[in-house]
Image (tube, helix red, strand yellow):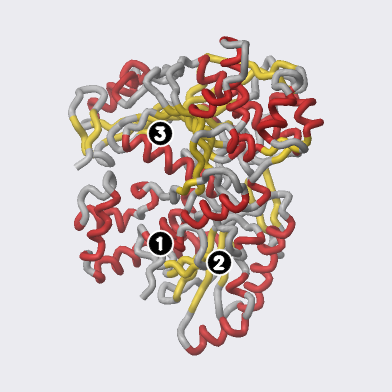
Amino acid sequence: MNTVKDPICGMMVPAGQGLSVVYEGQEFRFCSDLCRRTFLATPERYATGSAGLAPGASDVTRRIAYFSMEVAADPGMPTYSGGLGALAGDTLRSCADLKIPVVAVSLLYARGHFEQHLDEWGNQHEQPVQWEPSKFARLLPATVRVSIEGRPVVVRAWQYGITGLTGYVVPLLFLDSNVEENAAGDRELTSDLYGGDERYRLAQEIILGIGGVRMLRALGYTHVERFHMNEGHAALLAIELLRERKQTEPAAWDFDGVRRDCIFTTHTPVPAGHDEFWYGLVKQMLGDTSPLEVLQMLGGKDRLNMTLLALNMSTYVNGVAKRHGQVSQEMFPGYAIDSITNGVHSATWTSPSFQQLFDRHIPGWRTDPFTFRHAISVPAQEIWAAHVQAKTRLLEEVRKRTLLPFRDDALTIGFARRATQYKRADLVLSEPSQLIDIARTVGPIQFIFAGKAHPKDESGKEIIRRIIHIARQLKPEIPIAYLENYDLPLAKLLTSGADLWLNTPLRPLEASGTSGMKAAHNGVPSLSILDGWWVEGHIET
């Protein structure tokens, strides 16, 4: 049984049990109400040491810095938009479980990605997300400066603690330019995830890459040995590391030394996932702080390609599935690109009913996912009973949101991911008459869709409109719901409560995909195109 230490009395408490308090983004568990009350009286006194770092403290033992443009750290924090952020969050939770000495860096996003509203015709409307960072993270005292368009932009950091099953904490730093010293426009630079124009995006990547390295130094993380770029957005960190070494050894650029310190994970074969910037804009934004000759040598002659910069400055590069590694190798010939297939954090994505099932039959599954090989011995009737509980929770939420007559006994097919053309969410609805025939001759079916389209992705928005249009045509024989604001809590309900998980991307554009893995943790089978992780995960019978 996994245990964590009560910070007051030092006694061990079973993980996931007992009384708990979340303080400065860290969860603390107590054996008694006495200990809980003692902690709440002076939490700053007891937060030190028992679950990792004291709030705001640095840790020179952190040897890996993990940079990601988005991280799904907490359901209440809109610091993610989709798969990249979900993967980053699961990676850091796994690091915390395994006590890997990592510190993570991202951006704060005061307005999040956006709040999605769909009208009766399926038109997507975006509104800023309202949230209060101080309720989740602690503002740190350190600030750093980066130069953008010749102006010094002050950057601060908020710390959120990702607590592992053993109580070990991975500090996650959210960089924030909303500082009084900054001009009004500069205060907005970290407000919107994937918002604005190319200038806005490059400014964010300057803050993430260059500002992130400087913040680590300011907070005392001086023993970092590896800088992991989760996608190319943070590639300018390599330029900052070169600048640091140039100051101490002015004779030459230490390309090899910096390259040994950097690791790069590329996540997509879709061109939009590889940021490129016109050098006129790069010169305008960075000025003379980064020599153009060096940038062109490392990032491309005509445009600054952030993926190319990361490839050229990393000692190890990986794709996120075996097939994706091959596709990436074809996209970037001449580079050694390995593959490490994405995974999910089991304890996060397993529904309550299946957690109870696994606790009975597969003790230790939370810390040793390899024990899931014993799932074959779990009685089928118990699996079905756990699934019925998960499905009931999902359908209750769908009825509450939509008022549609979803049936408990109908085959419920789920599809939830970013609404973009290559994901082909509407493919299953391309022959409505066949669906009606199936419902009449085989049995009742119903569909649940969810997913946001990027505000500038008109083809993605059109897919949402098309699904809602077809839903009106098939009503009432085949209920179809499109749920707004796809987020972590909704993803947990969908991947655990659907009867069948659908995935129909256009090959080879699915780098990995992990929603099917989450479904599998809950006994839900996948019907998927052979792309991404499913090439490895499917079983031929």
Dot 2: element: loop
Say which of 82 and 390 sits in front.
82
Judge whether residue 156 can be spotted in this image: no
Mark 2 or mark 1: which comes first in sequence? 2
Judge whether residue 53 can be spotted in this image: yes
- Residue where numbered disc 2 is placed: 504
- Residue where numbered disc 3 is placed: 162
Dot 1: element: helix
Residue 516 sits in quarter: bottom left
Query: What label sits on residue 537 in the rendered view?
Result: 1
Quadrant location of the N terminus in the rendered image: top left
Cα separation, mark 2 vs mark 1, equals: 15 Å
Cα separation, mark 2 vs mark 3, equals: 33 Å
Left or right side of 10 for 493 = right
Dot 3: element: strand
Q: Where is residue 152 in the image (x, y as percent from the top left)?
A: 70, 16
Mark 1 or mark 3: which comes first in sequence? 3
* Picture layout, residue 98 above or below residue 428: above
Q: Position of residue 257 (x, y in %)?
A: 52, 23
For label 2, the crowd category at 10 Å Cα-Cα, with few meaning under 14, some 14 to 19 and many 20 or more, is: some
Residue lying at 63% horizontally and 61% vertically, measured from the top left:
422
Residue lying at 41% horizontally and 25% vertically, measured from the top left:
63
Query: Cβ–Cβ below 8 Å for labels 1 and 3?
Result: no
Q: Which amino acid does label 3 sit on?
A: Ile
Left or right side of 515 for 100 = left
Q: What residue type is labelled 2?
A: Thr
